[in-house]
Amino acid sequence: TGLFLPVVALRFMSRFLLVILVALFAGDAVASEASWGNLRAMLTRPVNRTRLLLAKVESAGLMALIATALIGITGLIAGTITFGWHPLNLPLPGAAFHQSTGHIVGNLALASGYVLWSLAAYAALSFMVSTMTDSPAAAVFAGVGLYIVSQILNNISSLDPISSVFPTHYADAWTSLFEGSGPTGDMLRGTLLMIPYVLIFGTYAWWHFRRKDVLS
C-alpha cells in the first residue's frame, strides 16, 4: 500500500536530514540577525528581548513543523499514485496483520509529531548557541554535533546503563506504531526525555540573551 511510503520517508529523513533542517531553522534564528547587523536595530524598537526570542522560537518551530509535515504529505501523494490507497493485510504465520487506512494515517500523524518533538534537544541547543554567536553555521553545527555524539555514545555497549539519557536513545520508538503494538512506554519516555534538554538550553539562551551586550 502507498500509505506506508511516507513511513519509509519519515524513517529515512529523521535519521539525519531532518536533524540538519531543524538545527538550521533554530541556529539561524538569532545569529543571522547579528551577522547581518540587524539585531541592534531590532532591539532599539519598543520590543523587549524576551518577546524577540519568543518570536524567533515560534518561527523556527513553525518551519520545522512544516518540514516534517511535508514529508508525510508528499509521501502520501507519491505512494497513493504509485501503489494505491488501501489498507494493509499480511497473512503472517499464526495471525493476520491488518491495519486500516484510517489507522495508518492516524499513526502517521502521531509518528510525525513524535519525530518532530524528538528533535527538540538539537533545536534547543542550536537556538542557545545562536544567541551566543554571530555565526549561524556554528549554531547549526552545535545541534548536529549533539546528534552525532549522542548516536555514537548510544551505540557503545559499555554505556548501556546510562544510554537512556542520550537524546537519540528513543528516537525510533515511533516505529512500533506500524508493527501492530501501538504506542509504547518507550514513546512516552522519549517524549519526557526532551523536556529537560529544552528547559536547560532554552532557559540558558533566555538568561544569556537578556544580559548580552548587542554590538551588531
Image: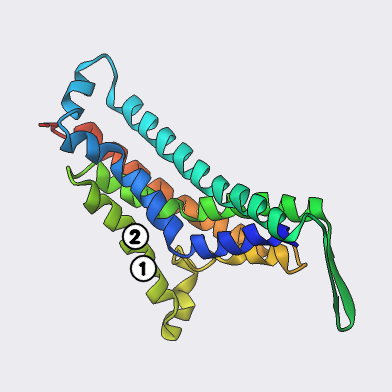
Residue matched to label 1: 148
Does the CB distance between marks 2 and 1 fall below 8 Å?
yes
**Which residue corresponds to the image point at 26% horizontal and 48% vertical from the top-left?**
129
Cα distance, mark 2 to mark 1? 6 Å
Task: Determine the secondary structure under disc 1.
Answer: helix
**Residue type for callout 2:** Val
> From the image, which quarter does the N terminus lie in?
bottom right
**Which residue corresponds to the image point at 40% horizontal and 39% vertical from the top-left?**
60
Query: Residue 52, how many percent across, how many down?
Result: 32, 27
In the image: residue 149, left or right of residue 134: right
Q: Is residue 183 visible?
A: no
Query: Residue 143, how many percent across, how many down?
Result: 33, 56
Q: Is residue 21 above or below residue 35?
A: below
Q: Residue furthest front?
A: 82
**Which of 127/64 is in front?**
64
Query: Residue 84, how many percent across, how many down?
Result: 76, 57
Identify the image quadrant of residue 37.
top left
> From the image, which quarter does the C terminus lie in?
top left
Task: Determine the secondary structure under disc 2.
Answer: helix
**Which of 140/194 is in front?**
140
